[in-house]
Amino acid sequence: MAAVAVEADEAGAHPAGARASTQHLPGLLRDLGHPGGIAEEGIGRLGGGVDVDLAGGVWGGHDPEYASARWANRIARHRPVGVRDVAQWGHAHHQHHHHCLARRVTRRANLLTPGGFFVPRSSPMRETYPMSQPLDLQGSFHVYDTTLRDGAQQEGLNLSVADKLTIARQLDGLGVGFIEGGWPGANPKDTEFFRRASRELDLRHARLAAFGATRRAGVRAADDPQVAALRDSGASVVTLVAKSHDRHVELALRTTLEENLEMVRDTVSHLRAEGQTVFLDAEHFFDGYRDNRDYALEVLRTAMTAGAEVVALCDTNGGMLPDWVSDVVTDVIASTGARVGIHAHNDSGCAVANSLAAVAAGATHVQGCINGYGERTGNADPVTVVANLELKLDRAVLPAGLLREATRIAHAVAEVTNVPPASRQPYVGTSAFAHKAGLHASAIKVDPNLYQHMDPIGVGNDMRLLVSDMAGRASIELKGKELGFDLSGDRELVTRVTDRVKAMEQTGYTFEAADASFELLLVEEVEGVRPSYFDVESGA
């Protein structure tokens, strides 16, 4: 089996280098024996902070179909699993200047598959849905993604129509029930998106929703051009934003409280008469509820009476805390009987917690943006919300098995947005199941559950063991096993490798993001000679 070697120094360790050094990867990967076709499809766009895995996916001794699926996940995510020396451009490792990447791919071991190292935690069986009884994604519980509209308001995030179509397909693959495509009529790009979506999107799980505002004051909904754009968008669902805070009605809309209620009633009833499902986003609801509870509730009642199916309570300024959200949602349901949703921003760092608090209080519709995208500090990440609902609360809200696609899809969307994914993102981040401390490794050697809250395969992620000056013998032994070496019977060898790593780290080397460098060191200690993969000859 051929070996791959790549050198990187300080000048070359950057995203542009990634493009240059990976342009021939598809053919190279085929030469190395990887599944045909997957590599070319999976390499995709190589943008800022892209990681390319040259090693993951060849899993000796495992079922070929399983190996192909794992390989596809690695490539699609651009995740470094076995080779991380120069694969982490765009992350926090630009300062490492000693990387040398070399890989014998046939020896890679998988620690997380059945029979591998990870021992799955036993847990109550979640409710399953046989093929004859599919989960109704537009039924008793809604997962509503607004990445293409609210997420696109993030600073530095700009999406073309083609980008939005690509992301919509990824979100549909996750199994969300609704995808908000944008605001037709408000800008040419969103209008074009809905025009092309009707021809180019074949959604298997989601319904497409168009976003817009209630009609203008003093104009009938049937005569308002913005309402007409919603009506003509081709979307079967329309989400209307309406003012529910009295001060916003008077200061921002510059109309009366009574006219605002009429704007809600007229617009909802008009779109319902046209055959569209209507959701209402009650903007600034929590702040409005605090200042004028009666009026905020009246906005909701007006929308429901006019035919809105859901009223989503929006923490538009993102300043709420979970207990406050729970109290308000409980009161709203008791006072209005409405079907309640939650739309939480993250300005107080509580968007996910607030969403879960709302669900616990009775909300059955959750909005959010994948990867937590959004204006200012972002929105609730529906992946985190859904993972908590499914894995912690045993509540099925996605089609069975699709949560395992979460990591791949989150990273695929990040590739399109060109916003590097946060490595410490819950569940799907590259560091979400990474272990560095020697004490942790000692415990993981006995049972991975001791330092992990779940089996990462449940969200399509991996456990990673990091080698550093914090490593003890257990870290070295487990990392060796991950790389295909059984070091358990040679305590002297493990001690020698551990001491050498610590000594090199003391002089400025770092192995945390350099698996291949560590493997070269390990091979040298095991075989007694530094490995050589090629010879360089000078011509005459």
Image (tube, rainbow, N blue to C red):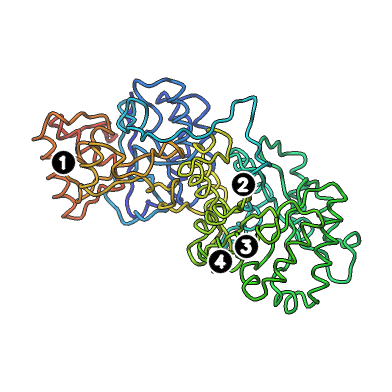
Q: Is residue 9 above or below residue 295?
A: above
> Which amino acid, by three-letter code, is at mark 3?
Asp
**Position in image of residue 475 (x %, y %):** 21, 41
Instruction: Left or right? Give the position of 215 relative to 417.
Output: right
Residue 331: which disc? 3
Depicted 241 relative to depicted 458: above or below: below
Sort mark 4 into few (<14), some (14-19) or many (20+) by Cα contacts within 10 Å: many
Asked if the residue under mark 1 is in contact with the one under mark 3, i.e. CB atoms within 8 Å, the reply is no
Q: In this orientation, which residue lies closer to the viewer: 389 or 504?
A: 389
Q: Is residue 192 above or below residue 454?
A: below
Q: Which residue is mark 4?
A: 318
- Mark 2 vs mark 3: in front: 3
Residue 355 spot, x, y in % from top left:
55, 56
Nearer to me, 426 or 320: 320
Instruction: Report the mark closest to the observer, 3 or 4.
Output: 3
Q: Are marks 4 and 2 in contact (CB under 8 Å)?
A: no
The residue under label 2 is 143
Query: Residue 356 at what x, y percent from top left?
Result: 52, 53
Q: Earlier in the sequence, mark 1 or mark 2?
A: 2
For the residue marked with disc 4, what is the amino acid? Answer: Gly
Q: Amino acid at mark 2?
A: Val
Q: CA distance from mark 4 to mark 2?
A: 20 Å
Q: Are marks 3 and 4 in contact (CB under 8 Å)?
A: no
Q: Identify the disc placed on residue 473.
A: 1
